[in-house]
Structure formats: C-alpha cells, structure tokens
Amino acid sequence: MPQTNTTHIPLTSADSLSEETAFRIFRAALASNLPVALWRLPGTKEVQVLVSAQVQQNLPPMEGPQRGFAFCPFQATSSTPNTFLPADLYFSGKADASPEKGETELPSCFWAYFEKTDEKQDAELLWPSHPAGPVKSIARDAFEQTVATAVKAMQAGCLEKVVLSRTKTLPLFNGFDLLTAFAQLTRLYPTAFVSLVAIPGLGTWLGATPELLVQIDRHRVFRTVALAGTQPITDKLTPADAIWRQKEIEEQALVQRYVVSCFRHLRLREYVEMGPRTIIAGNLLHLRTDFSAAMDEVGFPKLGTQMLELLHPTSAVGGMPKAAALQMIGQLEVHDRRYYSGFMGPVQLGQETNLFVNLRCVELGQDTVTAYAGAGMTADSVPAKEWVETELKMQTVLRLFQASES
Ligand SMILES: C=C(O[C@@H]1C=C(C(=O)O)C=C[C@H]1O)C(=O)O
C-alpha cells in the first residue's frame, strides 16, 4: 500500500483493503495498456475503478442502460476526442464487493498482471501521455496583457464574461508515485470528486474538482450547480462570514442564469433552485447555486442527457454569451485545453450518473506535470488578481508536486 503523509480521514482496514484492490486493478490496466479510470465520489470513502477493453467515441444516454465512464474534452478534436470507457471491469470499492465483469472480456495479460502486481508493487508505473507533449505555457506579463485585452472587449460591450485559463509545466520529482498522489488527494479533499484517468494515446489526468455538471441519482433526480466566484480561505474566514464583492456576485449570477436558460430552452419550469451559498473547495471559497428536478415527475425521463448537451461548456468555464466567449478563448489562449474544463465521471454505476467538470487538475507527461486553471473575467477584472487566482487554483493539486517546484 502506498505511503501517504496526509491522513485526514483515517481508513479502516476494510477500506484500505478495498483501496488496495482498486489500486491493483489500476496498475494491471496500465501494465496491459488498457484505458482505466479511478475515482472517489464527494463525501464517500470508496475508491472505485473501471477498466475497458477499448474506448468508444460516442457518449451513450446518461440514463442507461450502458454503464461506463465518460471522459470528454473542453472541445472535441481528433487528438482530444470525446471518450466513453465501457465498464468491462468495474469495482465499486465497497468492502464486501468484488470486481464485476462487463460485456467484453479483458485480455488475459490484464489478469496475469493483476495476479502479479501483488508482489511487484514497487515496479515503476508507466502511464500514457498525450503524443504532442505538454501544451504551451504563458508568462505572467503576457497573461496579464491578455486579461487586459479581454477586459477592454467587455468594457466595450462585446461580451459579459470570459473564462481565460493558463498552464504551468514542472519536471516530475524523483520518486513521484501516481497512486500515492491520488490517495493524498482523496485525504486532502473529502468533498471533491477525485479522479485519475489514463487512456492510451490520449493521456493521464489527475484532479480534485469541486464542480458537479450532471447528476442522476438512483431515484432519478437530476442535479446540477452554478459554481463561480473565488476567494482564498484565510484562517479567520468561515463560509458563513464570507463577504463577496459585486464582481463575484455578478460572475456567479451569470452562470446561474445560464443554467436557468438551459431549463427554459427545454421548457421545463418545475425545477428547484437553492442558493447561492458559499462553499469550500480546498484552499478556496466559491459561490454555488444548486438545481434539481425529479425527472419522471416533470415528464423529462432523459433530462440528464438533454441538459448535458445544453450545459457543456457552461459559463463557469466558457463565458457569456457562449459563442463570443468561446471565440475569444480560441483567440487569446496560447494552449489547447485538451481535457481541462471538459467533463468526466461514472455513468450508471451504482445506479447513478455523476459527471463533473475537469477542474483543479493536472496532466501527466512521462517526466512532467502540467497544471491547468482559469478564472472568470468581467469588465471589472484586475489582471494581477486573475493571475493570483489561477495560481491558487493550480495549488489545489500542484501542492503535491512541491518537490518539483524547488
Ligand atoms: C475555471 C476554473 O474554475 C471555475 C471558475 C471559477 C471562477 O471564475 O471564480 C470558480 C469555479 C469554477 O467554476 C478552474 O478551476 O480552472
């Protein structure tokens, strides 16, 4: 079992045994070059894992019957396609559960590695990376100039909000261990969706996101959120004491209105809206409005699939109006976002679908780690503050790579 130095939630021995089974499955999938997803849902302890014999490029309906894991980019291209990993092997991480097989048999080499990995835990894991290598990064001055350009466009009334992102690539430190990093994130961020996805030819992504995109629970209740507005947590500040500036209130209200516009588009009125309230996400506070609708009662049995199509990319990662914001992102960002600010998560596993926006994440190269983070800009944005905000967001995961930064 990998050593972790952050143990906020003590694991019982049954938990650590099933975590170890999930990790063994993950290692065997990497060794046999198979697509694999490992995750821990917010507020739960179980580490779940899924392996596929091969990936599909079309997403099935989110309401079933197909079970699997969706992994989709910000914008699909030939080098970053939408992917769906069918659940050819799924382990729920529950203490009394055993791995369940799906439709397609995994190759025998997977089972050979699965038996073997027990003794060879320390063998170095080789994970897939994107064939084009790390994306471009931007220097502070240039980023701030870019923000200033966007602010001018918003002051001129061309658009209301745009989310601009940047990246930072560091060399990986000696002795970096992928599964230890995953385990550390699960302990550090009990309310985040913690994930590690490795897909041959596409790359390996690790993250702890606070943002739900689409949930369909076992009672067929649909949920989504409008998350935006950011401030750092300080020692004295509890969510109840947080004071928000007009800029953040407006920024979050734009996302909230965007979600409402998606419901309106479907002519659905009977949804429940709660908030906004302040929530904690690692070292940051955000404003969040929660939405829900009982799909069958409101006469929208496919609401999850329909809303997913309308929501992504939300104005929490794109902007408002959407088309103008996406165009500006294409013009001003120097990197391809790949799977950052896309969405991912289990589909119809444990009778639920849970898709999250891929934020607070890093992409792993063979000997590099690239963090991605963005911030919502409005006409009132101050470039230097937006740089700091993206730095803080990157720290959510990059703090595990501190040895890389020295
Ligand atoms: C874009 C990111 O986060 C999003 C943008 C936020 C903001 O602009 O305040 C807050 C939360 C997220 O919806 C990111 O983490 O990279």
Image: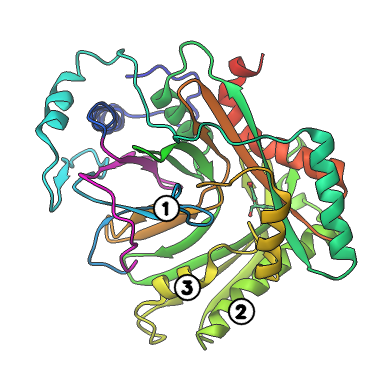
Q: Secondary structure at mark 3?
A: helix
Q: Is residue 377 left or right of residue 75?
A: right
Task: Give the mark nearer the N terminus: 1 vs 2.
Answer: 1
The answer to whether marks 1 and 3 mark residues whose Cβ atoms lie closer than 8 Å is: no
Residue 41 colored in magenta in the image:
yes
- Nearest the viewer among 336 and 197 is 336
- Nearest the viewer among 398 and 383 is 383
Q: Quadrant of residue 331?
A: bottom right
Disc tally is: 3
Q: CA distance from mark 3 to mark 2?
A: 11 Å
Depicted 293 relative to depicted 80: above or below: below
Name the spot of residue 344 as percent of width and height, x first.
43, 52
Q: Secondary structure at mark 2?
A: helix
Name the spot of residue 315 as percent of width and height, x first.
65, 64
- Residue in the image at 90% along x and 64% along y: 155
Depicted 229 relative to depicted 160: above or below: above
**Amino acid beneath label 1:** Pro
Which is in the foreground here, disc 1 or disc 2?
Answer: 1
User: Is residue 46 in view from this perspective?
Assistant: no
Magenta-drawn segment: 34-62
Name the spot of residue 318 as percent of width and height, x first.
65, 60
Q: Which residue is mark 3?
A: 307
**Amino acid beneath label 3:** Met
Q: CA distance from mark 1 to mark 2?
A: 27 Å
Q: Which residue is mark 1?
A: 81
Q: Which mark is residue 261?
A: 2
Task: Give the mark nearer the N terminus: 3 vs 2.
Answer: 2
Q: Is residue 148 left or right of residue 46?
A: right
